[in-house]
Amino acid sequence: MSSPFPSARIEFIALIASVMMIVAFAIDAMLPALPEIGANLGGVVENRRSLVIVVFLAGFGVAQLFVGAVSDRYGRRGLMLASLLGYAACSLAAGAVHSFFWLLAARAAEGAAAAGARVVASSVVRDRFAGREMAQVMSLASMVFMAAPILAPTLGTLILAVAPWRWIFVALAVLGGVLWIWVFFRLPESLAIENRRAIAAEQLLGGARIVVSDRASVGYSVGMTCMSCVVIGFLTSVQPIFADIFHHAEWLPGGFAVIAGSMAAASLVNSRIVMRWGMRRIGHTALIVFIVIAAIHAAVALNGRETVVTFVVLQAAMMACFALTTANFGAMAMENVGEVAGMASSLQGSFSTVISAIGGGLIGQSFNGTTLPLYEGVTLAGVVALMAILVAERGRLFMARHDAVLEAR
């Protein structure tokens, strides 16, 4: 694609991954600070602290309903720039509040701003790539993106060692500003003028109808939603797990880095094998293995045999499967709806985020001093995801119907 701002493939992947990172940083950097935030803003009880994460995701999810239509009408680049600017401003506002209520309000607005950048990033990738190549690009971007879960809790911990929790939000604002500069100078517009869609009721309904009537779009979106419940349930539970079950809150950054590292490794593996083995073989197999590991982890917790070693090892293995699953499910959800990529990314992302914020939030709120509620919820989410995929593929796993016909010949 010709562009006044040509950028190499590696830089493009790095830029998309970095934009995706703002969501992870806004969530994961908060984890070490939750106790201090709760104490500083009126002694917020333990389970309510997780709302700092949940409301961000709620704002992120609701805003996605509108982002896709706007980007399909006016293009990707301008909306991404506006979103990054809003993210930086809301981060500064969150760091300046003096009540838990206004912190939650600022976090919801911060999540809404992050939605614009995140949805547009997915749409830009779909504008340029399709099918297995899109899955490969998203896997490489996810591999870079996984640096955020590794670095963010450590960054939060380092900031807390020398400054109050409010400076974490200053760091998020700086991140948003740096990305704004990078996008401004290096990311071209990816949506041609002739491909833009008017914001009209008929057009919006038509685009939405394309998205919700496609079997793969709906089935894999439901699967992605279930898997997102897994991540949110984990994020809202992990801080009290290290602090209250293992009594070593200081181990959180290291344990989190190991778990996130397994996801990064899995994303790299997926980028290397997806062109040969295909999205369905990899994604479906990873989902089944994920369910098995989650059930084993639930059994370990039920029998009272959970240790920090079993927690980190089993969670890391499970999240590696998660990475293999979601990288391919996301591409398959978008596979047949490229003509309305912005609308598709918006509807799929909004549905996934809002529902998973509720489901994952419920998992976090059910914390009872053990890891059992987390892994009961995770196992259930995996089973529901598998059921959705079976419906999407009409009972056939591991290959698309047209691939099965070709292999039969």
Image (tube, grey):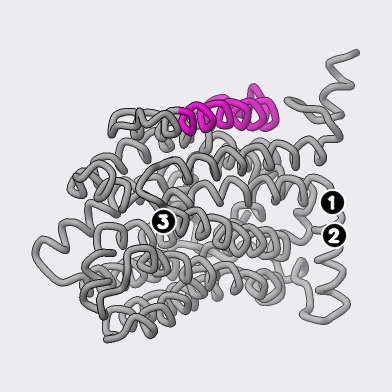
Q: Is residue 406 above or below residue 155?
A: above
Q: Which residues are magenta?
A: 270-299
Q: Secondary structure at mark 2?
A: helix
| Comes first in the chain, label 2 or label 3 | 2
Q: Is residue 218 above or below residue 271?
A: below
Type of amino acid at the residue the image marks with label 1: Asp
Say which of marks 2 and 3 sits in front.
3
Type of amino acid at the residue the image marks with label 2: Ile
Name the residue located 31 percent from the left edge and 80 percent from the top edge: 92
Q: Is residue 168 left or right of residue 321?
A: left
Numbered circle sitting on residue 210:
2
In the rendered structure, are the residues bearing label 2 and label 1 in contact, judged by CB atoms less than 8 Å apart? yes
Name the residue located 36 percent from the left edge and 80 percent from the top edge: 103
Q: Is residue 328 above or below residue 8?
A: above
Do we see residue 266 in this rendering?
Answer: no
Tell me where residue 295 appears, x and y as whole percent: 54, 30
Type of amino acid at the residue the image marks with label 3: Thr
Q: Name the residue tied to disc 3.
A: 236
Q: Is residue 311 left or right of residue 160?
A: right
Crowding near pointer 2: few (<14 within 10 Å), some, many (20+)? some
Q: Name the residue tied to disc 1.
A: 214
Q: Looking at this view, is 47 or 348 the one in front?
A: 47
| Comes first in the chain, label 1 or label 3 | 1
How many numbered marks are there? 3
Tell me where residue 307 appears, x and y as whole percent: 30, 31
- What is the C-alpha distance between the residues marked 1 and 3? 33 Å
Q: Is residue 395 magenta?
A: no
